[in-house]
Image (cartoon, rainbow, N blue to C red):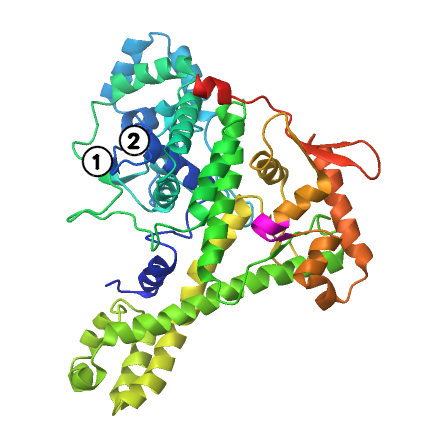
């Protein structure tokens, strides 16, 4: 069992959400890992494993001069690597032009304050304008380079499994997603040609002899979801299929995929912690211009976070007693061997001050009642704050990176819609070249996703009566969303009473089915 607050927290999270999500992973990295997995299965959603690519030499070439590791070393090519490059192109300036081209494809990653994430060269990624630019995160230890799971945790693998389970009984849908993804990621053949030239020269044949497992494996770690028949999974598959209908390039699609996948993961996580009904998302469409609307959105966010905290408390209770087993029979042994007790509950690597507090309480326990009251409370207090911190950070990161919400200086976290997220939610629900009436659209958002925006949804959800606000606030909130849709080219007004949401793109569906 895990040994430390962060690992203990991950153990709990795996029973609720799956093994494993990580708070250091950014929204684009969920997408990149999912695409890595999909390409590694040769576009087979029902594969049991996938192959990963290192392409370390090519990446050293692209990111030469960048940070290498925590000691602030700088990556530089070896003499032999440079000789290989000059054998490809005699003119050094042409080599620099190629490097600059690829450097401009780097995927930017940001933390919660908008500051660029501090990543070493082997943890950086490029926009996958062709599948040949997809590669897994690496770990560098002296002269050894191996695969890493620090920021490429298991989020993308878990999302792959969600689509796999969601298409289990829908073969045609599965094939459509696979075909559209293949078209998208193999389209830029000219990029593939130049990438191959450099990877063939700088990297030997690195293909793994055994694929990384996606399903049960006796000896190797593999990703796991606590449920395989969740009702959201088929919906996720249909939504990503709808998004992939758009006839746009991978650069634009990548931003929309980031919004969609983050939003789908958010819905899954919130549903898994729901114990008292449905999660609602009150959307601030006014971009903080109304303090009353902003406050309602913040309260909605806080309420959903509370669901996460409460669920983790319930699971903590279950894990604590399940781990201890026969308390009466083991209590004397634990008091004589306190480190064994810490091992049993998975906290052997706890900080010394926290460890002492637990062991002092254990020493005072005389019976089961003492363990269930005094010791239970102390252990819960010791790990509780850190436990919630790690898991809430995961949810906040997904909300922020997906464009579903965030915060500004001086305000609390709240829900809103970025332009990319707004486009994504339209394209997932309205087919190319088709339309939907505006009021019908926002009602769909309420029924399907729990989005509360305008007057009707505020009344149906009970938020209006609880808020004690004038109905005009909700009407303004709805009108601001209408205007935002119009500014993004997603809404056409025929009159004050009639407005249609439309998807202006062409569909690639015929090309896929041909």
Give the residue at mark 1. Answer: 211
| Furthest residue toward bottom | 366
Give the residue at mark 2. Answer: 40
Residue 313's place in the image compared with 139, above or below, is below
Task: Name the element at disc 2.
Answer: helix
Q: Specify whether residue 80 is in view.
A: yes
Tell me residue 283's x, y (percent).
Answer: 66, 52
Tell me residue 66's x, y (percent).
Answer: 39, 33
| Furthest residue toward right | 496
Q: Quadrant of the C terminus?
A: top left
Picture quarter containing residue 13? bottom left
Tell me residue 18's x, y (percent).
Answer: 35, 54
Picture quarter containing residue 444? top right
Q: Quadrant of the N terminus?
A: bottom left
* The residue stretch that appears in magenta: 446-451
Of the image marks 2 and 1, the number of the one nearer the N terminus = 2
In the image, 203 versus 389, the foreground residue is 389
Residue 82's place in the image compared with 47, above or below, is above
Give the left or right position of residue 199, taking residue 460 as reference. left
Residue 35's place in the image compared with 307, above or below, is above
* Circles 2, 1 touching at the beta carbon (< 8 Å): yes
Q: Main secondary structure of the magenta part?
A: helix
Residue depicted at 31% across the width and 74% down the height: 320
**Label 2: how many Cα within 10 Å (few below 14, some 14–19, many 20+):** many
Residue depicted at 79% across the width and 50% down the height: 476
- For the residues labelled 2 and 1, the Cα–Cα distance comes to 9 Å
């Amino acid at each position: 069992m895990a040994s430390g607050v962060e690992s203990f927290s991950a153990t709990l999270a795996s029973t609720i959400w799956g093994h494993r999500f990580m708070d250091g992973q950014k929204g684009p990295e969920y997408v990149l890992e999912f695409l890595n997995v999909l390409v590694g299965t040769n576009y087979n959603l029902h594969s049991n494993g996938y192959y990963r690519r290192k392409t370390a030499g090519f990446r050293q070439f692209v990111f030469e001069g960048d940070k290498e590791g925590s000691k602030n070393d700088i990556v530089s090519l070896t003499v032999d690597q440079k000789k290989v490059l000059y054998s490809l192109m005699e003119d050094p300036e042409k080599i620099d032009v190629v490097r600059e081209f690829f450097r401009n494809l780097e995927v930017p990653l940001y933390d919660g304050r908008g500051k660029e994430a501090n990543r070493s060269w082997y943890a950086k990624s490029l926009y996958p304008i062709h599948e040949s630019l997809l590669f897994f995160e690496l770990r560098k230890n002296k002269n050894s380079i191996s695969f890493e799971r620090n920021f490429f945790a298991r989020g993308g693998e878990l999302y792959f499994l969600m689509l796999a389970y969601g298409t289990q009984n829908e073969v045609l849908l599965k094939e459509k997603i696979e075909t559209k993804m293949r078209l998208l990621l193999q389209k830029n053949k000219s990029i593939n040609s130049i990438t191959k030239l450099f990877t063939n020269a700088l990297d030997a044949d690195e293909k793994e002899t055994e694929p990384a497992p996606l399903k049960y494996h006796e000896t190797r770690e593999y990703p796991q979801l606590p449920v395989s028949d969740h009702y959201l999974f088929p919906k996720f598959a249909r939504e990503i299929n709808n998004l992939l209908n758009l006839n746009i390039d991978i650069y634009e699609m990548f931003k929309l995929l980031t919004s969609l996948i983050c939003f789908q993961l958010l819905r899954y996580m919130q549903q898994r912690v729901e114990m008292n009904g449905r999660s609602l998302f009150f959307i601030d469409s006014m971009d903080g211009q109304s303090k009353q609307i902003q406050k309602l959105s913040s309260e909605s966010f806080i309420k959903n976070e509370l669901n996460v905290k409460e669920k983790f408390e319930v699971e903590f209770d279950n894990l604590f007693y399940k781990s201890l087993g026969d308390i009466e029979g083991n209590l004397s042994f634990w008091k004589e061997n306190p480190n064994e007790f810490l091992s049993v509950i998975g906290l052997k690597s706890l900080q010394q001050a926290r460890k002492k507090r637990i062991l002092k309480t254990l020493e005072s326990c005389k019976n089961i009642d003492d363990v269930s009251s005094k010791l239970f409370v102390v252990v819960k207090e010791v790990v509780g704050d850190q436990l919630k911190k790690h898991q809430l950070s995961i949810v906040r990161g997904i909300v922020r990176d997906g464009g579903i919400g965030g915060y500004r200086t001086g305000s609390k976290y709240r829900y809103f819609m970025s332009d990319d997220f707004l486009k994504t939610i339209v394209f997932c629900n309205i087919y190319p070249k088709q339309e939907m009436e505006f009021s019908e659209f926002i009602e769909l958002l309420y029924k399907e996703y729990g989005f509360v925006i305008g007057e009707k949804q505020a009344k149906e959800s009970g938020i209006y009566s609880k808020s004690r606000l004038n109905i005009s606030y909700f009407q303004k909130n709805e009108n601001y969303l209408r205007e935002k849709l119009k500014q993004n080219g997603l809404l056409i007004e025929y009159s004050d009473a009639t407005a249609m949401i439309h998807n202006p793109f062409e569909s690639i569906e015929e090309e896929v089915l041909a």
